[in-house]
Image: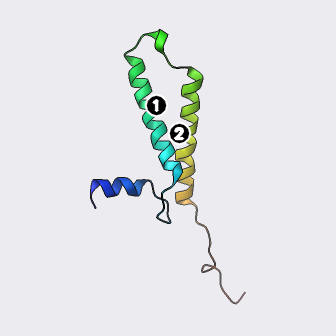
Amino acid sequence: MNFKQWLIDLFKDERGSTSVKPVIAFVGSLFLCVTMTLNSFSHADFAPSDTLVNAVLMITALGMGADSLDKFSHKKGSSDTPDNV
């Protein structure tokens, strides 16, 4: 497995299709890191709104949390239930 395939597999769910939750969490994390880095080199006049930063932080945290819950939740299918009940 090469790095490109590993990176693509990060954004897939248990069925093998691309999930939007880890993509949103990754983009939000990237946005927060770039914003905070640029903010550290700029004047206070150009600082982003605290409300905007907190909103992106919440969306990112919810995206990562929802993706983590999906990975650990087990959905019972019809093959898990016995036929003679």
| Of residues 4 and 72, the one drawn nearer to the viewer in this rendering | 4
Q: What residue type is labelled 1?
A: Leu
The residue located at (55%, 45%) in the rendering is 63
Q: Name the residue under label 2.
A: 60
| Of residues 74 and 6, the one drawn nearer to the viewer in this rendering | 6
**Helix, strand or loop under label 2:** helix
Q: Position of residue 57 (x, y in %)?
A: 54, 33
| Of residues 20 and 32, the one drawn nearer to the viewer in this rendering | 20
Instruction: Indicate left or right for 59 with 37 as reference.
Output: right
Looking at the image, is mark 1 or mark 2 earlier in the sequence? 1
The residue furthest bottom is 84
Q: Name the residue under label 1.
A: 32
The residue located at (46%, 31%) in the rendering is 32
Q: Which amino acid does label 2 sit on?
A: Thr
**Helix, strand or loop under label 1:** helix
Q: In this view, does 70 lie above or below 24?
A: below
